[in-house]
Amino acid sequence: MNTSIRKRLTYRLIPVLLVAGITFAVPTWLNVHEEIDELFDKVLREAAYSLSHSNVSQDVKPNTSGSASDSDGIDLVSQIRGPDGRVLFRSHSFSPLPQGGKLGYDTLNWQNQDWRVFNLKTESGFVQVAQTTQERRETANEVALHLLTPLLILLPGLALLVGWAIGRGLAPLAHVAEAVACRNPHSLDPIPNNDLPEEVSILVSAINALLSQLDQALAAQRQFTADAAHELRSPLTALSLQAQLAERAIEPAQRALAMQTLRQGIARASHLVQQLLILARLDPEAGDYPLTPLFLDDLALNVVADFAPQAANRHIDLGLSRADHVMVAGAEEALRILLSNLLDNAIRYSPADARIDVSVTAEATAIRLEVNDTGPGIALDKRNRVFDRFYRVLNSAESGSGLGLSIARRIAEQHQADIRLTDGDGGVGLKVIVTFPETSA
């Protein structure tokens, strides 16, 4: 189950506040007890020295009927003994403090309580001043609680403030989520990115970039669908008419001619559909092929062999004039489609007895794939246009789909290759040059 950012921050910050409070409270508590002990020790010592300088001549008889806990509010208990151990002075009427113990500060158990005692020996006797440790603890606890009360009030207040701050900090995310939720599939306008925190602004910028790419992909898809529908309408209409002519033909010769024309129309429509499917698969939104190292000369040799019968039927000399053994990073199927389209165009538009040479050349910093023909070529002002989808050169004797070079350019882009058209060797025909970046084997 996913946990909200608010809860995650709260679950992490509340323990931090508690740890900070404990880190402050524990040393404070211990320091207060230590300081109170030092303070009362000084009081015991000062009281003992004060009694040692007093003129004590009264003989106070001890009273064992009481105890140190009989009276409330008892703080200090003091007594003076003479050199012979007789009690000369007692501050309270309960039984005297036991004599003995080390001089200075000492701790003893008396009247079932722990007492802190300061023992002072003088020329005239022995002075003792005592205080219960319980009294010290109660006083220290009271002082510590007074000091820590603001912290105890502050911690819940800080927790509430942290919760409020988290809510305020996450408010821009809520606004962005609301803006996205209000969108419909046709609303691809950028999300407003004004006055947003930097972290949220980065997210919104990424979403806007994705929306822009999606808008472009949908626009390309709509354009492709419209173009495909337009291009398919004509051959399908022609096939329908040719089928009607074949049905109405009476003479065998007329029927044979109609059937031949129908088969040619079916072949052209099949070729167009095949090119459309290839183009749709190569569109940017469909994703690129994974590139792996392959030998370009071997691929060119296989494709030329596949097209050799087609070229021979049209009395065209097709061959591999140069094949350097070089490797490129590419997708074999895609590169096969690229070269096949180039050869198909060259064979389709070249006259009989023409020549088509394919070459693979390794250069210093690049690898070149060339298809050079001696056909009619393409006018200079139309060489950029022929890469557009469905564009066909006017007055061409051959009918085509207008997608071959568009597909070739898309495949070249996927391989970070450059494709361009130039005049053929000797200024005759057309040469298509595909330049690949050098790949280390």
Image (cartoon, rainbow, N blue to C red):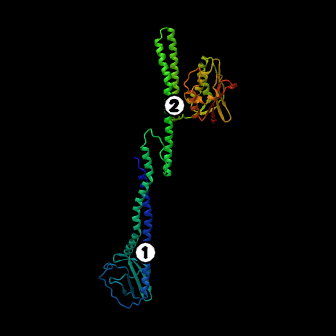
Give the quarter of the image for residue 369.
top right
Give the answer, above or below, for where 176 lies relative to 24: above
Indicate which disc residue 281 carries.
Answer: 2
Return the residue found at the far top. 251
Position of 23 compared to 422: left or right?
left
Give me the C-alpha separation between circle 1 and circle 2: 86 Å
* Numbered disc 2: secondary structure: helix
Q: Which residue is mark 1?
A: 37
First of labels 1, 2 by sequence position: 1
Position of 410 compared to 250: left or right?
right
The amino acid pointed to by label 2 is: Arg
| In the foreground, 219 or 279 | 219
Give the answer, above or below, for where 142 lies relative to 326: below
Asked if residue 338 can be seen in this view, the reply is: yes
Q: Position of residue 123 (x, y in %)?
A: 45, 88
Q: Position of residue 181 (x, y in %)?
A: 42, 44
Q: Position of residue 143 (x, y in %)?
A: 40, 72
